[in-house]
Amino acid sequence: MIKFIADSASDLMEYEGVNFQSVPLTLTTDDASFVDDADLDVHEMLEHFYNHKGRSKTSCPSTQAWIDAFDGADEIYAVTITSGLSGTYSGANVAKDQYLEDHPDTKILIVDSLATGPGEVLLLEKMIELKNKGKTFEEISKMIIEYRDSLRLHFGLSSLHNLAQNGRVSKIVASAIGIMNIRILGTASKEGVIEPIAKCRGEKKLIETILLEIKNAGYKGGKVRICHVENEKLAKAVSEGLKKLFGDIDLISIPARGLCSFYAERGGIIIGCEC
């Protein structure tokens, strides 16, 4: 049996046509815990974090959660959130080593997306595509890394509070965002960490800058995957802008699940594209 797996930072709870499983991260405060699975009410979670004045954090899936996800498969293709922001990739590899002790003939590929959300989706789709084309495990293991290096991830945020509180960005940078309608545009570096690119006043300027930066990154009309945090209007505007510039492209936009909603926060958007 072949199985495809992603952690919940991919925003995918299911994937039609293949044996797919999501492995959830957990989001917690002093008085509440939210498992990022199909039962999570993202709006309720966002309300809680918006009103919460104390600390909040995210937790990686347990080793056992990964082992349970591997169970029963002969060939496994998994993708995780960037190791630059989370220990999930490392934890998945610990689980892989333990699983192989009891199932030495199983083939397991775990890919560090160096991204999140849409970046993970694009990698998962490519692994499925390559497998459907009859590529071997060894061929996919090589080709998926080459493909990963062709992807770009951009995000537009109106708050960096949760990222700063969890040490993902500078608190100095975060303090200037959200004041006087200032938004930040950033990208994922080659190492998979967040790099702020520009500050934009208002959503209109943010959209213009997103489109310009995607074009400057080398985008010429490949696949685009978008997730948004309760901001379908912004996702639609970016989608229409890309289609106006590049024609009838393969573009899908979905609401963010728990992990991406926690870090991108309400109103945020994350865009992954093939360049």
Image (cartoon, rainbow, N blue to C red):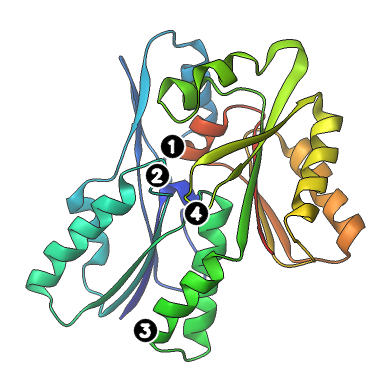
- The spot of residue 71 in percent (x, y) is 21, 68
Q: What whole-number distance in Å separates the C-alpha atoms at marks 1 and 2?
A: 6 Å
Foreground: disc 3 or disc 4: 3
Residue sitting at 81 percent across and 29 percent down? 203
Of mark 3 and mark 4, the one earlier in the sequence is 4
- The amino acid type of the residue labelled 4 equals Leu
Q: What whole-number distance in Å separates the C-alpha atoms at marks 4 and 2?
A: 9 Å
Give the vertical position of 129 relative to 112 (above or below). Answer: below
Q: Which of the numbered marks, if any, corresponds to residue 40?
A: 1
Q: Are marks 3 and 4 in contact (CB under 8 Å)?
A: no
Q: Which residue is mark 2?
A: 37
- The spot of residue 35 in percent (x, y) is 35, 37
Residue 99 or residue 178, whichever sits in front: 178
In the rendered image, the quadrant that contains the C terminus is bottom right
Residue count near mark 1 (Cα–Cα under 10 Å), binned few <14, some 14–19, many ≥20: few
Residue count near mark 4 (Cα–Cα under 10 Å), binned few <14, some 14–19, many ≥20: many
Of mark 1 and mark 4, the one earlier in the sequence is 4
- The amino acid type of the residue labelled 1 equals Leu
Of mark 1 and mark 3, the one earlier in the sequence is 1
Q: Are marks 1 and 2 in contact (CB under 8 Å)?
A: yes
Q: What whole-number distance in Å separates the C-alpha atoms at marks 2 and 3?
A: 28 Å
Residue sitting at 43 percent across and 20 percent down? 165
Q: Which of the numbered marks, if any, corresponds to residue 137?
A: 3
